[in-house]
Amino acid sequence: MGKFRKRKIITVILLILITIVAMTQVRGYMTWRNMDTFQRFAISVGGSVDDKKVLGSVVKIESKDKTLQYEAAEGNLSTDDIFCIASTTKMFTATIIFQLVDEGLMQLTDTLDMYLTQDELEGLHYYNGHNYAQSITIEQLISQTTGLPDHYLEEVDNKSIFEEIVEEDRTYEFEDFLQRVKMLEPHFVNGTEGKAYYADINFDILGLIAERLTKKGLEALYHERIFDPLRLENTSLATVNSQFAPIYLNEEIFEVALAKSSMGASGGLISNVNDLMIFLRGFMEGELFSSSHIDRGDWNEIQFDYHQYRNGLMRFELTGVWSLFGSYELIGHSGSTGGFAFYSPEKEVYIVGTTNQATDPSIQYRLMNQLIGSIGD
């Protein structure tokens, strides 16, 4: 058989395969188009559980006017389960700070030398031989524009806190976090225009400031200012004895009870989808503080792909070739253990939930995009 004939046969086979794939996709798309929104939701939530990376997921969706409401769980989770919301805690901490500003107890321009001791400030933000720590402002902390490093993921002596926890769950004190930050290099001078770097220490410091200013513990502040006014009955600051759905990492249970009890203002809350939805709406709709705080300032890119940050909020939107498959602007917050709480301005929809895993942080975003893309058309 000649080379030309072989190429022709191969080309024909490839064309047949491409045609079959295209027809399958078209049939799948037409089937999808003929489904109603809730059927699409069910397929997306069910498909999120693969019994490998994701063993359970739970979501709650509400349109802004509440004409659309949906709640579902798959795998080893139920809709009532309490789960770790991790860094979505930062929205709760931002709420307390905004309230203190509204009450005139602090200003966003306040600097760290007003709240931290000289020992705490010493060595905190050395950049090019100069210590900028004392000039860091509340606004820079809450918008991730301090330039401080991230003690959770950046390595000290070739190991990050995340890697330490994977090896063995343990507790930490604020002083442990502060010391690790001092052993790392800042990324830029605080307040550098257009610069942001996501670091848990920014919110750990905000929590400490709120406690010192009010002379109340963080748990009491959350209850007094958020949980009780919104009647959140299933939300609390994690302790070493807290019960919440087991988190998975690479198909194994990720033991984090001790570490989560240490995360406090940057990632220590546990909740369920009902409470999280009530809080998200309260945050976005001005129930808890002046809504002017949300829109103040500019969004700045952080180190995670497709993420920007401002005022205790993430903004996520796929760009480039990835957006060809559908992309929606999401404003809210996610956590490293699969939790999420976002608002879609385009669809005017709130979405909260978790994929309850620390293996792949992109999974919850794919799920959210699928669910929001299921609405309408």
Image (tube, rainbow, N blue to C red):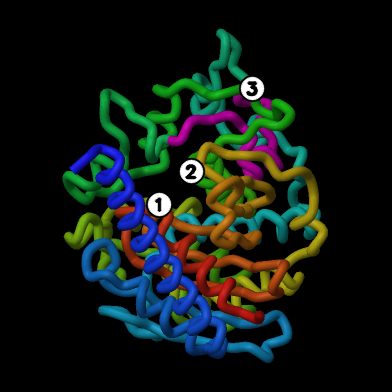
User: Where does label 2 land, which residue?
Assistant: 200
Q: Quick one: label 1 or label 2, which is nearer the N terminus?
A: 2
Q: Kindly identify the amino acid type of the residue bearing the numbered disc 3.
A: Val
Where's residue 256, x and y in %?
27, 57
Residue 245 visible (yes or no)? no
User: Where does label 1 land, which residue?
Assistant: 263
Residue density around tag 3, few if under 14, some if 14–19, many if 20 or more, within 10 Å: many
Q: Kindly identify the amino acid type of the residue bearing the numbered disc 2.
A: Asp
Kindly identify the residue that appears in the image at 17 percent across and 60 percent down. 252
Kindly identify the residue that appears in the image at 28 percent across and 79 percent down. 75
Magenta stretch containing residue 227, yes or no? no
Quadrant of the frame with the N terminus:
top left
Mark-to-mark CA distance, 2 and 3: 17 Å
Where's residue 11, x and y in %?
35, 50
Kindly identify the residue that appears in the image at 40 percent across and 22 percent down. 183
The answer to whether residue 121 is left or right of residue 181 is right
Q: Nearer the viewer, residue 285 or 173?
A: 285
Does the CB distance between marks 1 and 2 fall below 8 Å? yes
Q: Secondary structure at mark 3?
A: loop
